[in-house]
Image (spheres, coloured by chain):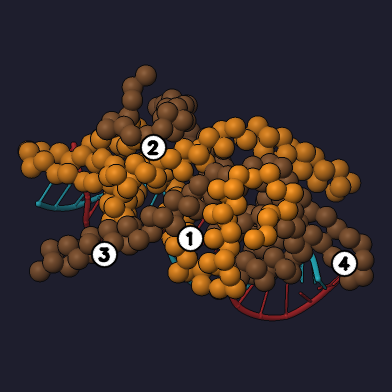
Chain colours: A orange, B brown, C red, D cyan
Amino acid sequence: MTRTHASNLPDQTEAVLRDFAVQSEGKTDYANCPVRDVLDRVGEKWTLLILVALAEEPKRFSALQRDVGDISKRMLTQTLRTLERDGLVERTVYPTKPPSVDYRLTALGRSALNPLASLIGWAAESHDEIRAARAEYDEREVVGAW
Amino acid sequence: MTRTHASNLPDQTEAVLRDFAVQSEGKTDYANCPVRDVLDRVGEKWTLLILVALAEEPKRFSALQRDVGDISKRMLTQTLRTLERDGLVERTVYPTKPPSVDYRLTALGRSALNPLASLIGWAAESHDEIRAARAEYDEREVVGAW
DNA sequence: CTGTATCCCCGATGATACTG
DNA sequence: CAGTATCATCGGGGATACAG
């Protein structure tokens, strides 16, 4: 039951990190790590943007492409397929002519919004501080070079 | 003040997502998005693992390499430099012989652990369901192919 | 409208060897 | 011990053309 150093973290956070640490203990198997499995998805370029776009309401393919921004059809399709396969998004085809398709979050997909919002919130809050840190670091670099 | 559809999300989550959506409204500027800026870091292969490893306690370069797993010195150095530049990690050199260096989380770095733990927790909880969804999807694919 | 099929390129990552 | 330097690779992602 080691506490993290200089801890000021909520017990909940401590517990999750401890579990994760224990589970990855000594293992080199990056590949089979459930957390990596999920995290790599979040890291994909468009996943987060699509989930957020769908949080608002179900959307059709073209509406999604408009809302997400400059995503290509190729990547939109590919990312949506992955999300569908993972059970986060549901795809519904209406056999009209021309065809119409809509995408919506599943219950599992909606449950992902909470941790994602947590991360988005932190990013938004911390961005100024991070940019300041970068500026200072780069300043030191330049000085150090002389 | 549109609520998300079929909403069962905490107000906090709703608010964060709404802010994010508003801020990205119509913009194609993926590049200048603060959230993307931070999220892309998390997406980097080793960032999360290093932060979690440092959550426990400050560690030296070699200890970190051992704990993280099969990371190369090259990537360990590179990722640590990025984290240092972003102000999440602090690097301290002890001019002994041979030299010794330790890395520890800054206050900012520690503050990142909360949202990250939130995501890790979700990933761990949801992994079974995700794997089940994949299995079902792939099953349908195979059947559909025949 | 909603995709597929190809081709291609660049940047992230890895392997290896060398150094203060 | 704690890195750097260099080269090789691999796949994510973009551009474009075609299709049901």
Residue matched to label 4: B99
Q: Toward which corner of the image does residue B15 lie, by quadrant?
A: top left
Residue B135 image label:
3
* Mark 3 burial class by Cα count in 10 Å: few <14, some 14-19, many 20+: some
What amino acid type is highlighted by mark number 2? Answer: Val
* Residue A22, image x, y percentages: 57, 66
Looking at the image, residue A4 lies above or below residue B38: below
**Residue B106 visible:** yes
Residue pictured at 80% horizontal, 46% vertical: A141
Q: Are marks 1 and 2 in contact (CB under 8 Å)?
A: no
Q: Could you say whether the residue bearing mark 2 is in a helix, strand or loop?
A: helix
What amino acid type is highlighted by mark number 3? Answer: Ala
Q: In 3D space, how far apart are the residues under numbered discs 4 and 2 (Cα atoms)? A: 47 Å
Q: In 3D space, how far apart are the residues under numbered discs 2 and 3 (Cα atoms)? A: 25 Å
What amino acid type is highlighted by mark number 4? Answer: Pro
Residue matched to label 2: A52
* Residue A11, image x, y percentages: 59, 48
Residue matched to label 1: A36
